[in-house]
Image: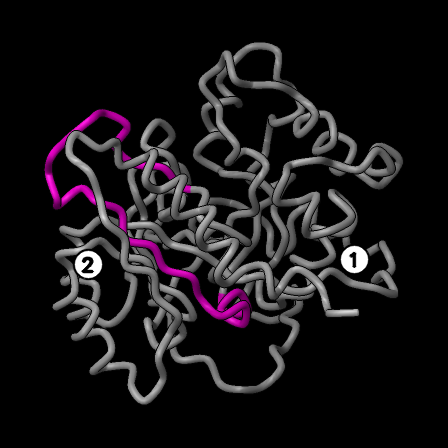
């Protein structure tokens, strides 16, 4: 969800956040009253879900995967409004009955508008945020929760039942996401290719069910790659000050210049792309996913050497 959920799963949910200080994030614990109120009250998820508890029982690996950027996908029509506000803001989420912003972890996985169009307003605009932004999330999920809600209502997918609590991990610490990558996929590269590790079957619940889920081919159910992508939930605005990469179409130079005026002297990497007539926005978004990997995400994959 967020840029995060496919149109088929749920409406787009923009987000927002405050400025991130240049310091290591503090791990938030279930004893923190702020966590208990903000996470448990609205939709009945405990401060620490079953996935978070399982991860807490597992040792941190000696070589932890590096933290990855978080992403948001919007359209050219919304670009100026986001720049004016200089932040992503929560929207009402029908899955959790709460105002939330969603970001995907590690890449541009959201897809929006699948039909051909000539409307320049539908052209995708992509944001990548500093990995430290994930420290501001309320909770982490190992899958697109819009897709999980759809699967929960389907026959033959019992492993997703109760996903709101079972697949939840408390936010506040990017190291939790790195640990999720390690124990579910082993490496960032395997995570981005959606290849779960077999050892996941022998770990505490609900990790065996995640292996079973991520090993399925759900194409015939209309479920795409996002069901193997981590999702971050935020209650606060996400500042555009923490952008590290922006992709936008020709014709949106003014909006990007306005963004730079607010963000300077910092300059995020950017990719300005040409577009063709009768384009499919979802196909262009897929091209931006590859470009984001090439230009920005690859340097977070692992340390050199």
**In percent of the image, x 59 and y 31: which residue is there?**
162
**In percent of the image, x 36 and y 37: which residue is there?**
111
Name the foreground residue: 268 vs 229.
Answer: 268
Residue 268 is situated, as x and y percent measured from the top left of the image, at 38, 74
**In percent of the image, x 84 and y 33: which residue is there?**
198
Residue 289 is situated, as x and y percent measured from the top left of the image, at 44, 47
Q: Nearer the viewer, mark 2 or mark 1?
A: 2
SS of the residue under disc 1: helix
Residue 239, numbered label: none
Specify start and end residues of the magenta stretch as a single range.
110-136
Q: Which residue is mark 1?
A: 56
Vertical placement of residue 216 versus 180, above or below: above
- Does residue 278 appear left or right of residue 57 in this picture? left
Please say whether residue 270 is one of the residues in the magenta stretch. no
SS of the residue under disc 2: helix
Q: Quadrant of residue 213?
A: top right
Residue 165 is situated, as x and y percent measured from the top left of the image, at 60, 41
Q: Which residue is mark 2?
A: 79
Instruction: Name the quarter where the C terminus is drawn.
Output: bottom right
The crowding category of the residue bearing disc 1, from other C-alpha atoms within 10 Å (few below 14, some 14 to 19, many at least 20), is some
User: Mark 2 or 1 closer to N-term?
Assistant: 1
Name the foreground residue: 69 vs 176.
Answer: 69
């Amino acid at each position: 969800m967020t840029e995060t959920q496919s149109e088929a799963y749920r409406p787009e949910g923009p987000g927002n956040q405050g400025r991130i200080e240049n310091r290591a994030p503090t791990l938030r614990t279930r004893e923190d009253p702020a966590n208990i109120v903000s996470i448990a009250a609205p939709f009945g998820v405990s401060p620490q879900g079953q996935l978070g508890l399982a991860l807490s029982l597992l040792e941190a690996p000696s070589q932890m995967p590096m933290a990855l950027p978080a992403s948001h996908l919007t359209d050219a029509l919304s670009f100026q409004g986001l720049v004016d506000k200089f932040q992503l803001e929560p929207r009402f989420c029908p899955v959790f009955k709460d105002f939330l912003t969603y970001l995907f972890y590690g890449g541009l996985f959201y897809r929006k508008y699948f039909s051909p169009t000539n409307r320049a307003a539908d052209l995708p605009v992509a944001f990548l945020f500093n990995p430290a932004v994930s420290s501001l999330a309320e909770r982490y999920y190992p899958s697109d929760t819009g897709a999980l809600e759809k699967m929960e209502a389907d026959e033959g997918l019992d492993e997703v039942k109760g996903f709101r609590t079972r697949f939840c991990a408390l936010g506040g610490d990017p190291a939790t996401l790195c640990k999720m990558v390690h124990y579910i996929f082993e490496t960032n590269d395997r995570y981005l290719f959606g290849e779960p590790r077999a050892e996941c079957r022998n770990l505490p619940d609900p990790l065996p069910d995640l292996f079973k889920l991520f090993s399925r081919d759900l194409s015939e159910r209309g479920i795409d790659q996002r069901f193997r992508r981590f999702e971050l939930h935020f209650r606060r605005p996400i500042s555009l000050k923490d952008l590290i990469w922006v992709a936008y179409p020709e014709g949106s130079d003014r909006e990007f210049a306005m963004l730079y005026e607010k963000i300077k002297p910092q300059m995020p990497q950017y990719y300005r792309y040409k577009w063709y007539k009768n384009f499919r926005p979802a196909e262009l978004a897929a091209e931006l996913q590859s470009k984001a990997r090439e230009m920005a995400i690859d340097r977070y994959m692992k340390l050199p050497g």
